[in-house]
Amino acid sequence: MGLQSHNHTHKIFLLCNYILLGAASSCIFLTLSLRLFPSIVGFLFILLHVITIGGAVSGCAASSAGSHKWYAFHMVATVLTAIFQGSVAVLIFTTTGNFLQAMKSYVREEDAGVILKLAGGLCILMFCLEWVVMSLAFVLRYHAFVDGSSRGGNGNANANANGSGKEDDLKNWPWPFQV
């Protein structure tokens, strides 16, 4: 039963990351539809979605490879983009006109407002999904650590069984932390 629930959690994690990929790329295209060569604000908006895509890709890589480096990048990118996605969504829905002026859109204002609110709705979706993804990543990492598997665990399941795992783990730490 534990393995089946772990596989189910892993599939949900991957599905959420794929939805994040689709939503972020859709926001990029919506932004480009407002102005093909974006202003500074538009460029930063697109950069936020590119970082979101990078976080989702690293999440997929972390879940399949079990690398600590990919996991760390995924968590940092997801936390930062979640904060900024929520902030941008609030800005879009509270000050749509000012946001459009900052983006220097050449689309008619009524149509640009609708396009921008579609992007804001996707930002809210991404904000919620990123918190779900972070929770699922933590659960997957915790289960991998408890199971001692090579997919995200410490990789020393046999060493921990005979008691020498702690010394092996300490040898991999940076030199100031080795005791």
Image: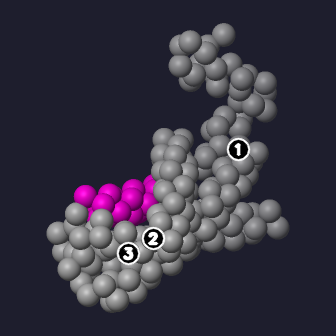
Residue on which the image places disc 1: 145
* Cα gap from disc 3 to disc 1, whole angstroms: 49 Å
Tags 3 and 2 touching, CB below 8 Å = yes
Of tags 1 and 2, which is closer to the observer? 2
The circle drawn on residue 95 is: 2
Q: Amino acid at mark 3?
A: Gly
Where does the magenta region start and end?
Answer: 40-58
Q: Say whether disc 1 or disc 2 marks the residue closer to the N-terminus.
A: 2
Tags 3 and 1 touching, CB below 8 Å = no
Q: Where residue 152 appears, x then y in whole percent?
A: 61, 46
Q: Amino acid at mark 1?
A: Phe
Lateral position of residue 74 relative to residue 100, left or right: right
Residue on which the image places disc 3: 97
Q: Secondary structure at mark 1?
A: helix
The secondary structure that most of the magenta stretch takes on is helix
Q: Say whether disc 3 or disc 1 marks the residue closer to the N-terminus.
A: 3
Any magenta on residue 41?
A: yes
Q: Secondary structure at mark 3?
A: helix
Q: Residue at x 24, y 84 (%)?
A: 107
Q: Is residue 100 above or below residue 67?
A: below
The circle drawn on residue 172 is: none
Q: Amino acid at mark 2?
A: Thr
